[in-house]
Amino acid sequence: MQTYLICLAVALVGGLMLSRLTKLIHLPAVTAYLIAGLLLGPFCLGSIRLPGFGFNSLEQVETLSIVTQTALGFIAFTIGNEFRLSQLKSTGAKAITIGILQAVITTLLVDAVLILLHLCFPNIISLPSAIILGAIASATAPAATLMVVRQYKADGPLTRLLMLVVAIDDAVGLLLFSASFGIATALSQGHVSLLAVVVEPLLEIILSLGLGAAMGWLLNWVEQFFHSRSKRMTISVAFVLLTVGLSTLKFQIGPIHCGFSLLLVCMMTGTIFCNICDTSEELMNRVEGWTMPLNILFFVISGAELDLNVLASPITLLIGVIYILARSAGKYYGSNLSCRLTRQDKPITDNLGITLLPQAGVALGMALTAASLPQGDLTRNVVLFAVLIYELVGPSLTKRSLIAVGEIRPEGRKSARTLNANTNQKSS
């Protein structure tokens, strides 16, 4: 126990200290946390095997998954706050259109490129792996995006649209992955399961939204018994922890395997709560402040679990580079096209796709599920390599895009965070 506590303390301090260095070159703090995780991970300082000083093995990192899952739950709960009915009336339909179109276009483009690679070089990548990687390409990392928005207090049309699209993207990505996984399984085993391709993914989304709605309503009901701000915040934290725990449950009804999506459950909880509770905005702000150390640990641990052994395989690097280029093109041009169809302003049309490049935990979870397919290890390694690149570069690109549209002020002698906070207060 003492080893893990020391390890978490070192991770927090290391991430914060490195963020002071990256600030000098105007990199987002989330990039510093990820780099800190890499440095403290089992392939760098952790390899010294000094107890408590870094993460000594990937197994040790995996034992801390409860921290990353909890942090992801709070992040999703916070994103649910973006789905207020007042905002959805003006941008909801457009955000849904953009979220669906850009994800589908990205999947189709990556599928087309990797299937072509399979036809030209069948020994390099199998058809099931090509199809699965196309679906995984649709997933976007909400955590990195949210951290950049929080750090610089970004606000404006692009920021608000981005938060909605990122949330919608996860539901669409889940459907695309489930359908693609069923097709890939059919190709490898010779039979198609309608339950796996259609019924189970739809049921997972319905169950997740239902559980999230119930938890959001229950949270609002319970909080009415408390009037102290600290106690109401404590109840909110307790309910998010409960929701994260319930979302990990799996069960079976006859031949149908049932489960929940942690992101969708917690997002729906936040959405229902923020729309029926009059003081939800204040409580959300207090919860965000409480969870900051947890979010730092999320990114440091995420950086530590990136397996640098993937860099030793030329085939993985080749497919990884092709995957990154195809996915980046899909996100950019898919968002550009969908923004044009929904008549967004030119700055949003030109920059939204770039802000959707970060990719992390959701994609890794999908790759882990696909491990049972032929070349499952290759799929996982390609995704690991892509996540390594996207997480190190993506937050900076998101920041640059938000600066380009004027929703983050460029950093000077005063921090962008302070300037944006003051600007938001004056405008309100």
Image (spheres, rainbow, N blue to C red):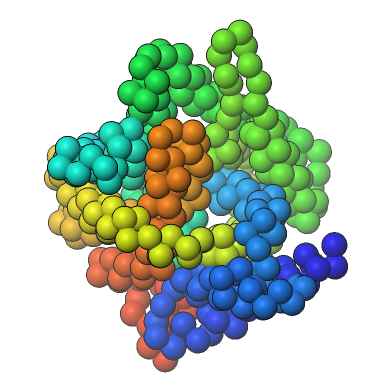
- The quarter holding residue 11 reads bottom right
The N terminus: image quadrant: bottom right
Residue 157 or residue 302, whichever sits in front: 302
Residue displayed at 53% across by 65% down: 303
Q: Is residue 257 above or below residue 162?
A: above
Relative height, residue 327 to residue 204 (above, below): below
One can see residue 196 in this view: yes
* Residue 342, percent from left and from top: 19, 40
Rendered image quadrant of residue 170: top left
Residue at the bottom extreme, as displayed: 413
Total numbered circles: 0
Q: Which one is in front, 52 or 154?
A: 52
Q: Residue at x 34, y 38 (%)?
A: 129
Q: From this view, report whether residue 144 is shown above or below residue 32.
A: above
Residue projecting furthest to the right:
2
Is residue 324 something one can see in this rendering? no
Residue appearing at x 36%, y 68% in the figure: 393
Q: Quick one: 139 or 387, which is closer to the camera?
A: 387
The outermost residue toward the front is 123
Q: Is residue 118 left or right of residue 59?
A: left
Which quarter of the picture shows residue 116? top left
**Where does the image place residue 182, in percent across and percent down from the top left?**
39, 23
**Relative image position of residue 390 (x, y in whole percent):** 37, 61
Task: Tell me where residue 295 appears, x and y as whole percent.
Answer: 60, 61
Q: Tell me if 221 is positioned left or right of 213 in this view.
A: right
Q: Residue at x 61, y 8 (%)?
A: 254
